Image (cartoon, rainbow, N blue to C red):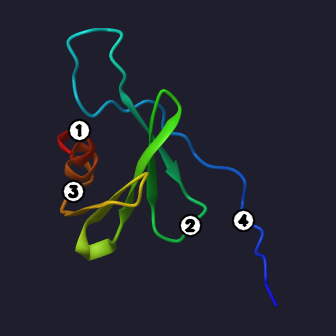
Amino acid sequence: MTTLIEAPRTATTTGPMPIASTTTNDAPHLDWETVDAVQQQVWIGRVRGIFVGMVESRGADGFAVTTRLGRRLGLFPTLEEAQDAFIKH
């Protein structure tokens, strides 16, 4: 038997939060939105509206980074370092 749980359909959007500066105005930047429908905080990364990965708060362990393809980029001590991992990999 399968049990379905109806999750809230709203999320708080923090707006664009570029994590790297660019030299041209037409270069894409990574937008982050906070998803508070889960127990731990999760940030969803999008470029031009396309999902590229997520950062998950792991409490005292730091922030876990996963790409859209499920590749784990590691644990980072700060949110900023975790978000920067997408630019470096």
Q: Which corner quadrant holds the N terminus?
A: bottom right
Nearer the camera: disc 4 or disc 1: 1
Callout 4: SS: loop
- Residue farthest to the front, as pictured: 69
| Mark closest to the chain's N terminus, 3 or 4 | 4
Callout 3: SS: loop
| Mark closest to the chain's N terminus, 2 or 4 | 4
C-alpha distance separating marks 1 and 2: 25 Å
Residue 87 vs 70, above or below: the answer is above
C-alpha distance separating marks 3 and 4: 28 Å
Residue at screen point 21% across, 56% down: 78
The amino acid at mark 2 is Val
| Mark closest to the chain's N terminus, 4 or 1 | 4
The amino acid at mark 4 is Ala
Q: Nearer the viewer, residue 43 or 27?
A: 27
- Residue 17 appears at what percent x and percent y? 37, 33
| Mark closest to the chain's N terminus, 3 or 2 | 2
The amino acid at mark 1 is Ile
Q: Are marks 2 and 4 in contact (CB under 8 Å)?
A: no
Q: Which mark is residue 7?
A: 4
Q: Nearer the viewer, residue 74 or 34?
A: 74
Q: Nearer the viewer, residue 3 or 37?
A: 3
Binning the other alpha carbons within 10 Å of mark 1 as few (below 14), some (14 to 19) or many (20 upward) gives few
Q: Which residue is mark 2?
A: 38
The amino acid at mark 3 is Thr
Binning the other alpha carbons within 10 Å of mark 3 as few (below 14), some (14 to 19) or many (20 upward) gives some
